[in-house]
Structure formats: structure tokens, C-alpha cells
């Protein structure tokens, strides 16, 4: 059975394949990040970490946009601007950084389905996903310099290795808008598709049909390989593989493939 939870800013549904769909639900404001949206997204991330049977996550926005970034008027009207940004309230991140970093830290793959507008903080949230499916006419921007600030929700770590350094610098310094088609050429988008949500869900179903232990092991390896030395990466690969070989889910992956049926994995 599917399970669902909703707030005034987000909706979270887990289907019977283990795919969680997290939707930003403030369409009248193009899903801009006000304090309530920030709190709802962090709460959703905490629920995802503890969710039994989770195989993959798709993040999307309702209405005309994925996320228009920070709602500056709402943020300025609250206490957020006086918050101690240097304090580490969520592991190695502050509360704003957690909005994006929580998706990179989830144990399962996360796919962002991006359409309409994806500015500033919205683009950094998309950066936290493992994959991004973007509509060709999406309007994207590293918007922060327009307001005299810098991107500070993981931008400088999450895009490393994806976007060419000089291109990332130009877009950060200029705050200019670019399209979904250009985003793929630059490395911001994994796929460009006129129906990003349908494509993202199809990818999530492919992931959900694989050995969940191996998927989680692969995500751990990607996470540690970003910083680790070659020797540590090679040892980590061997360690993860040794745990998988002969396990019940690995055996089921082989049997189901040979028998041409859908696998039945254990949590």
C-alpha cells in the first residue's frame, strides 16, 4: 500500500514499489523557499531517512515551477537573517545547506524532476539529487549574486565534477539565466525531457527493481570516492562487494534475472 503525508508546503507519498515522491506544494509562489517550506523540506528529509522499504526518491514542484529560490520577502520578515550561519546544526551543514545536502546524504538515489523555473536555492536543492531530469524550456539561474550574496546551500561542493569550473564561475558571477537544454551541455542536467516527472519516475522504477543492498552500497561508494585516496576507494569497493556476494538479495537478483521475473527483495 502507498503511504502519504502532507503539509502546507510539501507532500510525500511512498508507493508500493518503494519510490517516494516528494512534491513542493506552494505553487502560488512558484514553490519559493519561505521558513515554512524550509521546515517542511527538512522534516520530509528526516522522514525519508527513517522510511522502511525506501528504494528511490523523486523530487518535483507543483504548478509552474520546480522552485524559484528563496522567498526573500518572507525570509527577511522572520528570524532567518539573524541565524548563525556558521554554526553546524545538521552534521557538517547549517539549516539552509541541509535542504540540498540531505538528498546527497540519503542512502538511496534521488532524482530531481525540474520544470518551469529553477533559481538560486531551488537550483542548489536540485544539485543535491543524484540525477536531474530537466525540461528543455526550464529557466535556471545561479541567482544569488543578483542580490549581492553568494550561493551557500552546497553549491560549491555539489556541482564539483559535474559542471566545468569556468562555466560554473561565469554563471555564478553573472547570475544570468540559462535553459534546460543549455543545462545539459554544461553538466547541470542529466537528461533533458519535455516531461521530466514521467522520465524521473521511469528511472526510479528501474532503480527500484535492482538489489537495494547493492544500490545503497553504490551510493556509499560514490559519496566516499569524492574525497578519498585511490587506495581507500579500492578497498571500499572490495569491502562492499564481499558483503553483497552470496547475500539473499544478491542471490534473488541472479535468480529473478535468469527466470525472467520481477525480483522479490527483502528490506
Image: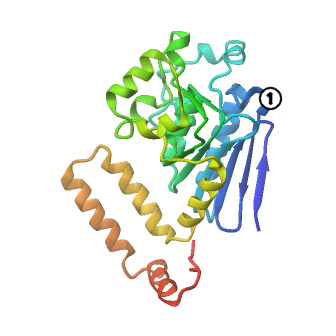
Quarter of the rendering occupied by the C terminus? bottom right
- Of residue 252 and residue 168, the one placed in the foreground of this image is 168
The image position of residue 123, as x and y in percent, is 55, 32
- Of residue 129 and residue 115, the one placed in the foreground of this image is 115
Quarter holding residue 56: bottom right
- Colouring scheme applied when the structure was drawn: rainbow
Q: Residue furthest left?
A: 231
Say above or below: 139 vs 50: above
Q: How many numbered markers are drawn?
A: 1
The image position of residue 197, as x and y in percent, is 65, 50
Question: Is residue 150 toward the left or the right of residue 25 in the image?
Answer: left
Say above or below: 85 vs 235: above
Instruction: Kindly identify the residue that appears in the image at 47 percent across and 81 percent down.
Output: 248
Crowding at dot 1, Cα within 10 Å, few <14 / some 14-19 / many 20+, comes out as few
Q: Residue furthest bottom?
A: 259
Could you say whether the residue bearing mark 1 is in a helix, strand or loop?
Answer: helix
Instruction: Kindly identify the residue that appears in the image at 39 percent across and 34 percent down.
Output: 157
- Of residue 144 and residue 116, the one placed in the foreground of this image is 116
Say above or below: 111 vs 41: below
Quarter holding residue 64: top right
Instruction: Kindly identify the residue that appears in the image at 79 percent across and 41 percent down.
Output: 7
User: According to the image, label 1 marks what residue?
Assistant: 28
The image position of residue 36, as x and y in percent, is 73, 29
Quarter of the rendering occupied by the N terminus? bottom right
Quarter holding residue 73: top right
Amino acid at each position: 500500500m502507498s503511504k502519504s503525508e502532507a503539509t502546507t508546503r510539501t507532500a510525500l507519498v511512498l508507493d508500493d514499489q518503494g519510490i517516494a515522491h516528494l512534491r513542493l506544494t506552494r505553487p502560488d509562489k512558484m514553490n519559493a523557499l519561505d521558513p515554512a517550506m524550509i521546515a517542511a523540506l527538512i522534516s520530509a528529509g528526516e522522514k525519508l531517512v527513517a522510511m522502511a522499504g525506501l528504494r528511490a526518491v523523486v523530487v518535483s514542484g507543483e504548478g509552474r515551477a520546480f522552485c524559484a529560490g528563496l522567498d526573500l520577502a518572507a525570509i527577511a520578515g522572520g528570524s532567518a537573517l539573524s541565524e548563525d550561519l556558521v554554526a553546524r546544526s545538521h552534521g557538517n551543514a547549517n539549516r539552509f545547506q541541509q535542504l540540498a545536502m540531505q538528498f546527497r546524504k540519503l542512502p538511496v538515489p534521488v532524482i530531481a524532476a525540474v520544470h518551469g523555473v529553477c533559481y538560486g536555492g531551488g537550483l542548489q536543492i536540485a544539485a543535491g539529487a543524484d540525477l536531474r531530469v530537466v525540461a528543455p524550456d526550464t529557466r535556471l539561474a545561479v541567482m544569488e549574486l543578483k542580490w549581492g550574496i553568494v550561493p551557500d546551500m552546497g553549491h560549491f561542493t555539489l556541482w564539483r565534477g559535474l559542471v566545468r569550473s569556468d562555466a560554473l564561475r561565469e554563471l555564478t558571477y553573472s547570475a544570468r539565466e540559462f535553459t534546460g537544454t543549455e543545462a545539459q551541455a554544461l553538466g547541470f542536467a542529466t537528461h533533458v525531457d519535455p516531461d521530466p516527472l514521467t522520465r524521473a519516475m521511469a528511472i526510479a522504477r528501474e532503480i527500484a527493481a535492482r538489489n537495494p543492498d547493492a544500490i545503497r552500497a553504490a551510493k556509499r561508494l560514490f559519496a566516499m570516492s569524492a574525497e578519498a585516496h585511490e587506495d581507500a576507494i579500492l578497498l571500499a569497493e572490495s569491502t562492499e562487494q564481499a558483503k553483497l556476494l552470496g547475500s539473499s538479495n544478491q542471490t534473488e537478483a541472479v535468480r529473478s534475472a535468469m527466470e525472467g521475473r520481477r525480483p522479490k527483495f527483502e528490506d
